[in-house]
């Protein structure tokens, strides 16, 4: 690729970043002014549609009182981070990439990739997903982040704990290990069983249009986003019927997806705890973990941070939701803004 084209691409990425940040800041400003208007007694009459939208926004604004925007609260959040090492944990689907009908096409944008790359230059960064670890790497394609797949059951981490506040150590750990460090796979013995269930489910549900069964190595995802609503109960019955023979596996539900995984006491929260300890980030005085995620499975990680009284759990949601998270971001574009804020905060202070 020529130098000019590279420069042009960088200018384009930077201007996209600026557009996203401007757009998010404009929206936040609008939201604040709408909050003010709600208190005015002489509010104009609105059409039904406007009222529905307005009440949804009001409900969201009320929810945000308990879970403030991490963009608005950024300076306050980071005021305790100056002497600490910030460690960034990110979910993938719905956090770094939009939720799409075909999970094989949940690509992240180039500008999001650039934002994650920038953050990873300054802070240890780990992507924790329900998907196969190698699949997440295929989407993200960055060599300076750690990858954890299968809801925390497939962990790649460097050999030595990184025990000091020195980001160069983190860089070294990754380079030396070529991004394939020590693996921790607490559910290894379940691999043959998962393979068996995967084949059985594929066979059993092959008549149902639109079903997509994803083999995530240590767990299976049955996606029904593209299945006709009238076939949902048929699919559910087929899955439950198959699973009767596998009491060692657990069934959970996510966004238009049924997840099947080993019934061991291991989840994204345990994986987060394992990583904090293994990487030497367990000390509350020295490190500040941030965990950003949108799904029910991320709640396990939010709970761990709350229990440890360490760091900030941040939920990605555009609707009010029951959550253990302390802060919120509305959608992946706000996640990107937050990551860029974080990068600039560090860049300006170093
Ligand atoms: Mg997600």
Image (cartoon, helix red, strand yellow):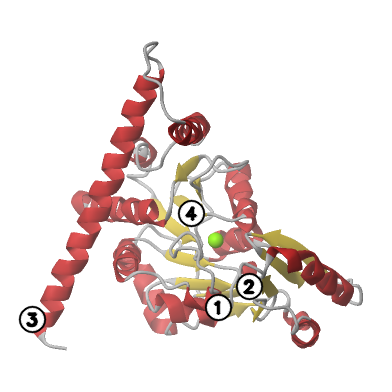
Ligand 1 closer than 8 Å to label 2 CB: no
The answer to whether marks 3 and 2 mark residues whose Cβ atoms lie closer than 8 Å is: no
The answer to whether marks 1 and 2 mark residues whose Cβ atoms lie closer than 8 Å is: yes
Residue holding disc 3: 4
Q: Between disc 1 and disc 3, whose residue precedes?
A: 3
Indicate the quadrant where residue 39 lies: top left
Q: Nearer the viewer, residue 24 or 182?
A: 24
Q: Which residue appears farthest toward the front when viewing the image? A: 47
Q: CA distance from mark 4 to mark 2?
A: 17 Å
Residue holding disc 2: 150
Q: CA distance from mark 4 to mark 3?
A: 36 Å
Q: Between disc 4 and disc 1, whose residue precedes?
A: 1
Q: CA distance from mark 4 to mark 1?
A: 18 Å
- The quadrant the N terminus occupies is bottom left
Left or right, 93 with reference to 324? left
Residue holding disc 4: 292
Residue holding disc 1: 133
Left or right, 269 with reference to 201? left
Examine the rendered structure and indicate whether residue 79 appears above or below residue 251.
Answer: above
Ligand 1 closer than 8 Å to label 4 CB: no
């Amino acid at each position: 690729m020529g130098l000019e084209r590279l420069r042009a691409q960088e200018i384009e990425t930077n201007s996209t970043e600026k557009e996203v940040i401007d757009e998010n800041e404009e929206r936040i400003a609008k939201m604040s002014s709408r909050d003010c208007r709600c208190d005015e007694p002489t509010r104009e009459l609105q059409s039904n549609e406007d009222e529905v939208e307005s009440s949804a926004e009001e409900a969201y604004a009320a929810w945000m009182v308990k879970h403030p925007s991490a963009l608005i609260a950024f300076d306050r959040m980071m005021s305790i981070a100056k002497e600490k090492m910030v460690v960034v944990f990110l979910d993938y689907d719905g956090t770094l990439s939009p939720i799409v009908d075909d999970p094989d096409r949940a690509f992240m944008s180039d500008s999001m990739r650039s934002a994650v790359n920038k953050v990873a230059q300054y802070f240890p960064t780990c992507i924790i997903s329900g998907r196969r670890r190698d699949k997440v790497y295929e989407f993200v394609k960055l060599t300076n982040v750690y990858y954890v797949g299968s809801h925390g059951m497939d962990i790649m981490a460097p050999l030595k704990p990184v025990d000091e506040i020195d980001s160069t150590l983190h860089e070294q750990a990754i380079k030396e290990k070529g991004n394939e460090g020590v693996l921790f796979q607490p559910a290894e013995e379940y691999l043959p069983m998962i393979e068996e269930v995967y084949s059985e489910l594929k066979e059993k549900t092959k008549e149902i249009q639109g079903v997509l069964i994803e083999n995530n190595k240590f767990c299976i995802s049955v996606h029904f986003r593209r299945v006709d609503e009238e076939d949902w109960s048929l699919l559910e019955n087929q899955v439950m019927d198959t699973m009767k023979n596998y009491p060692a596996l657990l069934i959970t539900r996510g966004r238009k997806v049924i997840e099947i995984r080993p019934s061991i006491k291991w989840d994204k929260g345990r994986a987060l705890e394992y990583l904090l300890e293994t990487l030497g980030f367990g000390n509350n005085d020295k490190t500040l973990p941030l965990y950003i995620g949108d799904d029910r499975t991320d709640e396990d990680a939010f709970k761990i941070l709350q229990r440890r009284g360490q760091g900030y759990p941040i939920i990605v949601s555009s609707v009010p939701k029951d959550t253990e998270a302390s802060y919120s971001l509305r959608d992946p574009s706000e996640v990107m803004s937050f990551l860029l804020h974080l990068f600039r905060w560090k860049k300006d202070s170093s």
